[in-house]
Amino acid sequence: MFLSIVYVLIGFVLLVVGGEYLVRSSVALSFKLKLSKMVIGLTVVSFATSAPELLVSLQAALNGLSDISLGNVVGSNIANIGLVLGITAIIGPLTVDKDFYRFNWPVMMLLSIVLYLFLINDGVLSRIEGMILFVALILYMVLLIMRSRRASAIAVEEVDDALQKTSAFKIVIWLLIGAAALYFGSELLVKGAETIATSMGVSEGVIAVTLIAVGTSVPELAASVIAALKQEKAISLGNLIGSNIFNIASVLGLTSLIQPIAIKDQALMGVNIFWMLGFAFILIPIAFIPKFLVIGRVKGIVIFGAYVIFVSLVFL
């Protein structure tokens, strides 16, 4: 058991390091390819920050642990709202932009419902369904870029201008470090989590929806908390919603294209997916009531409290 916990911790660290290097190398490479800063921020960075979830889900699916694949995404989407958004709002109020309720939230809600319908149908996320999700992601990104071009000035905080001067050699080294760290990190995390689940007598789905989900949401949590403490409004609701969209459409879409995902743990469909849909839906009333377009401390405490209840119920 102790060794498994060490595996999980090393896995988390490698995923954070791998994700960071992958983002840096991707952005530097995009500058070399003469992509605009806006396109890089909206597409390349989003893909790179979803890499830990993708690698963990893929590794689990290939090892026949499909509950970890699905539980990781369901739990990550719950953690992004309940844990990351909740804690960030407690530190400092977040303003909600119009794009959230006009575009990003409807897309996230639609994809969450589509995922539920695909799974409730036959308990399997097939290759065709994976392809549909992935095509939806490409469509979302095209619309995102078109909408941003119409906006007068889009701030892309997560794209570092200094990376324009990166040499090709450095980019290759960063890519190799990132890929290796993500590969070994996901390998150790899945291996450790499987052993912990067995020794605790709980299902892999429970470990995936809590421990692994929080672990793969660590980059978002760290970035959001740092931004909130610095009182930078760089962390927007859009970032977290975008992350949830990528988790469903890119992580599950690509994973099921390579290896169809079958549900074994009935709690995933009977309970946890409803929590995911609930956390996604509740954002609309929370954004509008009582203080219009502001998510303050009280709302943050409510969201975080709901997350604590969810985790408690999962283990009970």
Image: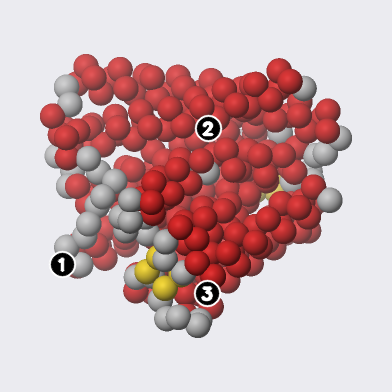
Q: Which residue is mark 3?
A: 286
Amino acid type, residue under disc 1 in the picture: Ser
| Residue type indicated by callout 2 | Leu
Between 156 and 95, the one nearer to me in the picture: 95
> Which callout, 3 or 2, points at the residue further toward the start of the chain?
2
Q: Is residue 143 above or below residue 27?
A: below
Closer mark to the observer between disc 1 and disc 2: 1
Q: Which residue is mark 2?
A: 55
Mark 3 → mark 2, Cα distance in angstroms: 33 Å
The residue at which mark 1 appears reads as: 152
Question: Residue 234 falls in which quadrant of the image?
Answer: bottom left
Q: Position of residue 263 (x, y in %)?
A: 74, 46
Tell me which amino acid carries mark 3: Ile
- Front residue of 289/184: it is 289
Quarter of the view holding residue 30: top left
Q: Nearer the viewer, mark 1 or mark 3?
A: 3
**Residue 146 shows in this picture:** yes
Identity of the residue drawn at 68% across and 55% down: 308
Q: Is residue 300 left or right of residue 233?
A: right
